[in-house]
Amino acid sequence: MCGITGWVNFSRDLRNNADVIKDMRDSLTHRGPDESGLFTGKNVLFGHRRLTVVDPTGGHQPMTKNKGGYQYTIIYNGELYNTEDLREKLIKKGYRFAAYSDTEVLLTSYLEFGENCVDHLNGIYAFAIWNEKKQQIYIARDRLGVKPLFYYHKNNEFIFGSEIKSILAHPGVKPIIGEEGLLEIFGLGPARSPGSGVFKDINELRPGHFLTFSKKQLDVKRYWQLQSKIHPDSYQTTVAKIRNLFLDTVNRQLISDVPLCTFLSGGLDSTAISAVAAQQMRKKGNILNTYSIDYQDNDNYFKKNDFQPDADSKWIPRVSEAIASKHHYYNINNSELVASLRDAVIANDLPGMADIDSSLYLFTKNVKNNFTVALSGECADEIFGGYPWFRNSEDINADIFPWSKSLALRKYILSDKIDDNSLEEFVRSKYQATINEVPLRDDETEKESKMRELFYLNMKWFMLTLLTRKDRMSMANSLEVRVPFADHRLVEYSWNIPWEMKYHNKIEKGLLRDAFKGIVPEIVLNRRKSPYPRTYHPKYGKLIREWISEIIYDSSSPILKLINKNHIINIIENQNKELNEPWFGQLMRDNQLLAYLIQVNIWLEYYQVQIDF
């Protein structure tokens, strides 16, 4: 894993701007602390920071190869999981390789297949290639959006980077947000519209897309989309195929030249990954290390609810013993959890999921002390329907995002300067735009179409929010986290599996549970879904309310221009119980809303955001 950034301008000579690209590159040092590199051309500058995972000596970047008398230079962030398959194909076509890195295989794939090289990739990636022959830059992002890529295009300037901070490090780019950016923050946050960078003139390359930029134009194209068709397989065949795809995916993602571990919550998804990893490591005479997170004294304050039916603490030791892993517990105290809200904002370049982010930031920082690569269980719930909103008819038939069903609280906190109607129209337009993209089949029932729409919404919005969170918090600590359930083959196959199969015997993820029989220990095979843990300690709420109160009563706080101060005071004093609803998803409510506002204020201050509306 790495950090990439670049600057292209066909109307000026950039070769004397090495200091600019170095600043842009080094803003991403956390993504790649092991090495740095530069590529300098007349109209193009590339910067690269490397986190060494595979082929330490042969994977230096930027990497250049020659073909037909022209040079082709790549900078790349990610991992290919079909490197050897691709290398074998390319060798048969006459290519030779200097080393065994996936970077060289990826660049060679571009030499052979051109823009269609992405059709041959299995992995997580964002990369840029300078094509000397065409005088063109080619940039692509993986199908599900595991790895990030942002870009700025204005006048003759094209600037890009793994994170927004690398673009803002360019002196020509200012941290400005307009009305649309504010609606992103307050109407949709911590989610973002597909392709939105929130800041003016900054966009995110959408998953499954590539772009080309030349003297003539900027052209963005989609290269991957889910295809809806009849699922021909029986239930037992489907179970077997899911099982085999899963096993192949995890085994491919265990390849690493540096220490590797897994995250283990004691739930179905992380247990399945850890069980396979532990078995493979035992074959090599090694023991798998597993990690979990919890909060100081959380057992004393845990509150059961429909989203979180039980705590992980009683399940983790049982699973660890069953799979024979060496387990590590990391308990966070509430003071550092609150203090790290700032670190999480800087890691994300935007307000995020409050303490859900800051806890992951602290957790991955701890894991990095001993490991460079980890495997995690994200994406299974979005792909196989693990959330309650897949089973509630009210959510299925709603015409709004199920993880943020009511806009009342969002409207309530806003300043009068931001129109309520604009916020509602904005959110509903984004919802409808996504619904319009869903590849429906003409022969499906209304219920089947509704379920397709719900799965599509989850994959394009909720899942991407969680993947963004995982990438930023882990890479802020130079830890690569792989997500086997985001393998595009698994996603493509599961997309057409009928809901009745996924919800087999009316059991949450019933199909997946059957597929994991013999892999997952019996003790957790039927455990109900329990999401990422959050703190229930009253000290957390006390610290959050103290901090937001300081912000509210400080006349210099930039957030005061955007929110209704009196309404926030009502929330702090719990005088608005009728608005006590989730802000986002399953976990962000009550104290997490106030923590989100703290993050907004941190963001406005730290990035010196200019508000233009």
Image (cartoon, rainbow, N blue to C red):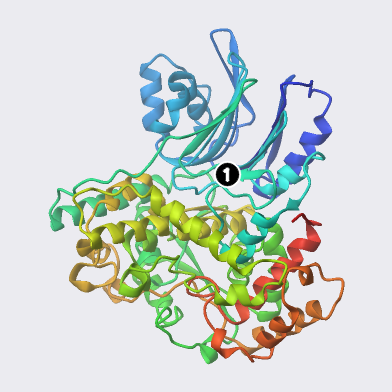
Count how many numbered circles sit on residues in the image. 1
Viewer-proximal residue, 95 or 42? 42
The answer to whether 213 is drawn above or below residue 69 in the figure is: below
Residue at position x 18%, y 71% from top? 505
Q: Quadrant of residue 371?
A: bottom right
- Give the residue at x 58% y 70%: 356
Is residue 577 in view from this perspective?
A: yes
Q: Nearer the viewer, residue 238 or 312?
A: 238
On screen, residue 67 above or below 503 = above
**Relative image position of residue 296 (x, y in whole percent):** 60, 83
Amino acid type assigned to the residue bearing label 1 in the image: Met
Relative depth, front residue between 393 and 462: 393
Q: Residue under circle 1? A: 1
Asked if residue 19 is positioned above or below residue 195 in the image, the reply reads: above
Give the x, y percent position of residue 474.
59, 57
| Side of 513 relative to 167 (left or right) | left
In this rendering, does residue 392 appear at all? no
Left or right: 279 in relation to 31? left
Classify mark 1: residues with Cα within 10 Å, few (<14), some (14-19) or many (20+). Answer: many
Name the quarter where the C terminus is drawn.
bottom right
Q: Quadrant of the N terminus?
A: top right
Horizontal and vertical percent for residue 98? 53, 22
* Residue 83 vertical placement versus 504 (above, below): above
Q: Quadrant of residue 9?
A: top right
> Which residue: 59% across, 11% down?
70
From the top left corner, tell me how far across and down residue 86 is, in percent.
Answer: 39, 29
Q: Secondary structure at mark 1?
A: loop
Q: Say whether residue 442 is left or right of residue 612.
A: left
